[in-house]
Structure formats: C-alpha cells, structure tokens
Image: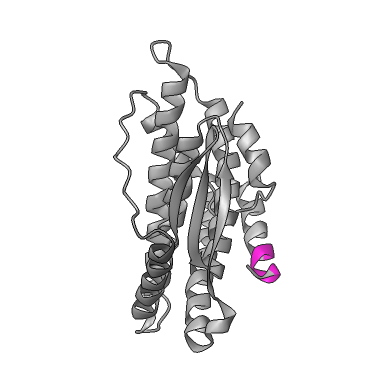
C-alpha cells in the first residue's frame, strides 16, 4: 500500500479512537478507512489490467503458532477470501503454515489487516468474561469464530461497495479474471487439494466475538507484526 494511502488510513483511525469523538463520528471515521482499503484494491486491479507487471500473481507463507492456531487460521481465511486471495493450511509442529496465493496488492492488504485484527482479537478476548459454566478454551475458540465471521462479512460488503462505486463497467470482469488466475496458481501447486470438514465448537462465546468483530477497525493501523500479535493472543 502506498505511504500516502497508509498515512491517510492511520489518520482516520487515530480520529476514530480519539476519546473526544462521539460514537457516530468514530464509526464514520472507521468506515472511511475501510472504504479506502477496498477502493485501493479495485484501483490496483484496474491498473494491473492495463500493465500486468505492476501487480503480479504471487504467494507467501505465514507461520501460525499455538495457542489457538486453528482459530487464527480461520481469521486469516475470513480476511483473505473477500480480498480475492486463497489459502492452503499445512500442519507444522504445534501450529500451521498458511500458504497464501493472490496478487501482490491483495496479499499486502491481507497481511496488513490480519496483523491488526490479531491484536484487536487479543484485546477483545482479554476483556471478554468467560461464563462460569463454560470452559475457557472452548469459550475463546467460539469467540474467535464469531469475530472472524463478522469480519469476513464486513470485508465482503466493503469490497462490493468499492466495485459498485468505481464507475468502471468492466471492473467486475477484471476482478473475476484475477480470482480465476489466483485459483489456477493454487491448483498448479496443489492439484489434489482436499477441503477440510467444518468445525463443531462447543463454547458460548460466538455472540460476544461477533459483537467485537462488528466494532473492529479494518484499516490496519496497528502494524506491530504477526509474531507479536500471536503472543498477545496466547495470553
């Protein structure tokens, strides 16, 4: 992401977090930051349609460490898919290696948001009381599932709005072609990929996590790095 765009997003989020802001003002600043990130993705896609060298298809591997490694993977997938990236989970020690595929600009957006959301999830979990009748680990897993589901929905809505507001009739075709190219790149490396079965979670934290997901900042202001965020989430 360009420094100018990143600076604008940071300023919006700083305003959103100012205690002097009313809830309505804070929500407006946060929504604008999310809109900018989505619009950036559309702009880069249209630029690459004219000059493919500006935004090549690529991949990267992220190490997702315990505890709650599988739940962190779920959050990463919830961020990656709306931003037109695909991921493959591979077991690695007591965690996972997540192999991400996507265009360079979209991989950059995923990395930015995922790093920030890990930190926000850690803060949210720390503040969420575990009911006396619930097991702490089960509650936290279901909390993270709720958080991830709402984040994914918010990102899909922002991407849809950015496409609608682009004013370019062909943008949907451009983005569909990019998604197809990412899928082909993944299939080249994983021709026999299997889909994991759905999880069954017993904890009662889903609604609490979903509420936190609805409040989360999606502009990526906190860029402390995924390893630090992982450590916070493990507390």
Which color scheme did the rendering employ for the protein? Answer: one colour
Residue ID at (48%, 77%):
45
In the image, 79 versus 191, the foreground residue is 191
* Part of the protein shown in magenta: 3-7
Depth check: give the residue in front, 46 or 17.
46
- The answer to whether 70 is drawn above or below residue 8 in the figure is above
Residue at 60%, 55% in the rendered image? 112
Q: Quadrant of residue 54?
A: bottom right
Q: What is the tally of numbered marks visible in this picture?
A: 0
- Looking at the picture, how far across and down is residue 136, in whole percent? 47, 18
Residue 171 placement: quadrant: bottom left
Residue ID at (50%, 40%): 72
Which residue occupies 40% across, 58% down?
190
Is 44 magenta? The answer is no
Judged left or right of residue 224, residue 84 is left
Counting from the top left corner in percent of width and height, residue 26 is at 56, 50
Along the line of sight, the residue nearer the viewer: 194 or 216:
194
Magenta segment's dominant SS is helix
Is residue 6 shown in magenta?
Answer: yes
Q: Is residue 219 visible?
A: no
| Residue 210: percent from left, percent from top | 40, 38
Question: Which quarter shows the C terminus?
Answer: top right
Residue furthest out toward the top = 132
Seen in the image, is 141 located left or right of residue 107? left
Asked if residue 124 can be seen in this view, the reply is yes
The percent coordinates of residue 16 (x first, y second) are: 60, 50
């Amino acid at each position: 992401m360009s420094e100018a765009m990143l600076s604008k997003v940071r300023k919006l989020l700083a305003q959103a977090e100012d205690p002097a802001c009313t809830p309505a003002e804070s929500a407006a600043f946060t929504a604008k930051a999310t809109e900018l990130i989505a619009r950036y993705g559309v702009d880069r896609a249209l630029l690459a349609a004219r000059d493919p060298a500006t935004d090549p298809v690529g991949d990267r591997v992220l190490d997702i460490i315990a505890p709650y490694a599988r739940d962190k993977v779920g959050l990463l997938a919830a961020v990656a898919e709306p931003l037109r990236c695909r991921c493959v989970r591979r077991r690695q020690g007591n965690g996972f290696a997540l192999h991400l595929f996507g265009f360079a600009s979209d991989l950059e957006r995923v990395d930015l948001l995922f790093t920030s959301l890990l930190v926000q999830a850690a803060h949210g979990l720390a503040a969420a009381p575990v009911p006396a009748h619930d097991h702490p680990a089960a509650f936290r897993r279901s909390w993270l599932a709720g958080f991830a589901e709402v984040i994914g929905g918010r990102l899909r809505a922002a991407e849809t709005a950015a496409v609608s507001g682009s004013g370019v009739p062909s943008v949907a075709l451009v983005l569909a072609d990019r998604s197809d190219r990412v899928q082909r790149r993944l299939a080249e490396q994983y021709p026999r990929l299997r889909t994991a079965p759905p999880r069954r979670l017993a904890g009662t934290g889903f609604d609490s996590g979903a509420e936190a997901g609805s409040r989360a900042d999606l502009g990526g202001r906190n860029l402390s790095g995924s390893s630090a965020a992982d450590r916070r989430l493990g507390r």
